[in-house]
Amino acid sequence: DSGVTQTPKHLITATGQRVTLRCSPRSGDLSVYWYQQSLDQGLQFLIQYYNGEERAKGNILERFSAQQFPDLHSELNLSSLELGDSALYFCASSVVGRGHDEQFFGPGTRLTVL
Amino acid sequence: QKEVEQDPGPLSVPEGAIVSLNCTYSNSAFQYFMWYRQYSRKGPELLMYTYSSGNKEDGRFTAQVDKSSKYISLFIRDSQPSDSATYLCAMSALRNNDMRFGAGTRLTVKP
């Protein structure tokens, strides 16, 4: 158990809908990362937050947005969902988020868009 | 061409074998090189990380980085059935946590 929690574990929804994925980082970790893992694209970095502020952006679509709250939990919002958004979404956390400190991954949320 | 190339396998070996996993990359800015292990239905966990070129050993695992060839390897000695998992290479530029992952190699170690 990495100490990172994600809810829900599974999510099934329809095209065009909007969903919110939630992540609680390890105690003491200030930085949160979101990743998407799909069969065709592999594991891709989406976005990083540090202590409430966006720090780095990867291959995140404009339909997706994220935020980190004062209690350091984070939410990833996915809107106007398409079939291709079906994937595993992982959250990871690290202490600081600079240089390279280890990222600890949560168990993921499996999103299915029908 | 993908930024990070990794043969997805699958790779099947007998227990006790030496396993060699490899990745190549194209971005010369990468300075940090990582290997993650991912069990089925779980998140990735960090196995090894190396800064710049060289070797690093941790128990049965050895990571090698050859920046001149843009080639990294992970060796597993005395492989065990519990090593059966998907192994992902990952890399990032200095002070940049935008990690780029390989496709992952699925390894099965048969008793």
Image (cartoon, grey):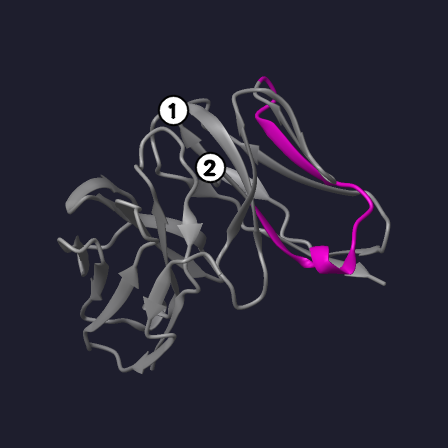
Residues A46 and A22: in front is A22
Quadrant in the picture for the C terminus of chain B: bottom right
Q: Earlier in the sequence, mark 1 or mark 2?
A: 2
Return the residue at label 1.
B94
Given the image, what chain letter belongs to the residue carrying mark 2?
B
Residue B24 vs residue A96: left or right? right
Q: Is residue B85 magenta?
A: yes
Q: Residue at x 19, y 77 (%)?
A: A17
Whether marks 1 and 2 lie on the same chain:
yes
* Local secondary structure at mark 1: loop
Residue B94 coordinates in the image, percent (x, y): 38, 24
Callout 2, which amino acid?
Glu
Q: Are marks 1 and 2 in contact (CB under 8 Å)?
A: no
Disc 1 versus disc 2: distance between alpha carbons?
A: 16 Å
Identify the residue position indicated by label 2 in the image: B3
x%, y% of residue A90? 38, 59
Identify the amino acid type marked 1.
Leu
Residue B20 is drawn in which quadrant? Answer: top right
On the image, the x and y values in percent for residue A8 come to 33, 75
Residue B77: percent from left, percent from top: 79, 41
* Within-10-Å neighbours for mark 1: few <14, some 14–19, many 20+: some
Q: Give the range drawn in magenta.
A: B68-88
